[in-house]
Image (cartoon, rainbow, N blue to C red):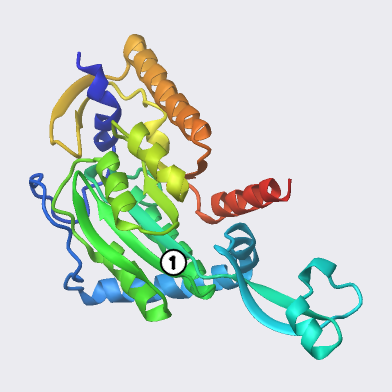
Amino acid sequence: MAFGLFRRKNASAVAAPARGRRGAAAPPRLPSHTSPAVPPEILRQVKLLELRTRGLVNSLFTGEYRSVFKGQGMEFAEVREYQSGDEVRSIDWNVTARMQRPYVKRYIEERELTVMLAVDVSGSERFGTHRRFKSEVASELAAVLAMSAIRNNDRVGAVMFTDAIEHVVPPRKGRRHALRLIRDILAYEPKGRGTDIGAALEYLNKMLAHKAIIFIVSDFIGENVEHPLKLLSQRHDVVAVTLEDPSERLLPDIGLVRLVDPETGQTLDVDTSDPEVRKQFDTQVSEEASRRRHLLRRLAIDEVPVTTESGIMDPLLRFFRTRERKLRK
């Protein structure tokens, strides 16, 4: 049996019907930079999402975000008279000589950052057996990160991808821009179903001229990821947000079922009560997770595991606080 394809196919046996239309995979194309037409219900979702995430960002993430993501350097602010306790090395000797008393240079952190959200919108994201689909979790997480960036006067943008670059929101500042980004993630209907994470990473590497913070939001079901991920992490601060549904970790014993691959439409009949089938499934799931964790550790990329059965706040807070502890060492 073609067990190599089984991991992705197992999902849609118990998934709810896909929310939105799906067409056949399209050939390579230029990404869209224009906003899609937005139905009123999407605008209501954006408003509700903003209200929910704004409170969370203001109460929980303001300090964590700022302390973890530093600016790109120090910027000269002013010269002032020396005070007791000032660092001697900060004395501006030219001004001191002119004024006949000591003056020091004062610098402030150059705070402006660019945050990019690389969001997987392939067929496997339209799946969930608990409260939400993986795509809905991705939307909420993107909203929190976008609002955190805007709250700290950083630029934020997004790249949505399947097996091609589907839609691009260039990084900018401001609340209106953040709401536009959230709206696009909620409303956009991708033309492709497949997944090519490597191509998305290569696109980001070419698109971003300066160092950025890149959150890759995906279930990471894909191939040929290592090389482009390595190149991207050498130039940018990359964080992997791995989306997962509990049913993707455990094959339920429900007898003979017909499974459908959400990305290719192929079907496979599987006897889930067969102990050998369940053993192969468990082995493959464990090996895939182990390979992913090993790759991310080797490239020094932080992982934020998020599931459809729980909220996004606890995983994000753990990530921020773990990274803050690392920075203090």
Q: Could you tell me how many numbered marks the image carries? A: 1
Q: Which image quarter holds the C terminus? A: top right
Question: On the image, which quarter does residue 105 sit in?
Answer: bottom right
Q: Residue furthest top?
A: 276
Helix, strand or loop under label 1: helix
Residue 6 placed where, x, y %?
26, 24
Nearer to me, 234 or 114: 234
On screen, residue 95 above or below 228: below
Residue sitting at x 35%, y 76%: 177
Question: On the image, which quarter does residue 158 sit in?
Answer: bottom left
Q: Residue furthest bottom?
A: 99
The answer to whether residue 308 is left or right of residue 89 is left
Q: Residue furthest right?
A: 84
The answer to whether residue 291 is left or right of residue 92 is left
Nearer to me, 227 or 317: 227
Question: On the image, which quarter does residue 36 sit in?
Answer: bottom left
Residue sitting at x 32%, y 14%: 277
Residue marked by disc 1: 146
Q: Which image quarter holds the N terminus? A: top left
Nearer to me, 285 or 274: 285
Q: Is residue 9 visible?
A: yes
Q: Residues within 10 Å of mark 1 (few under 14, many from 20)?
A: many
Q: Is residue 125 visible?
A: no
Nearer to me, 84 or 31: 84
The residue type indicated by label 1 comes to Ala
On screen, residue 109 above or below 163: below
The answer to whether residue 54 is left or right of residue 193 is right
Residue sitting at x 14%, y 28%: 267
Residue 53 placed where, x, y %?
49, 69
The answer to whether residue 193 is left or right of residue 23 is right
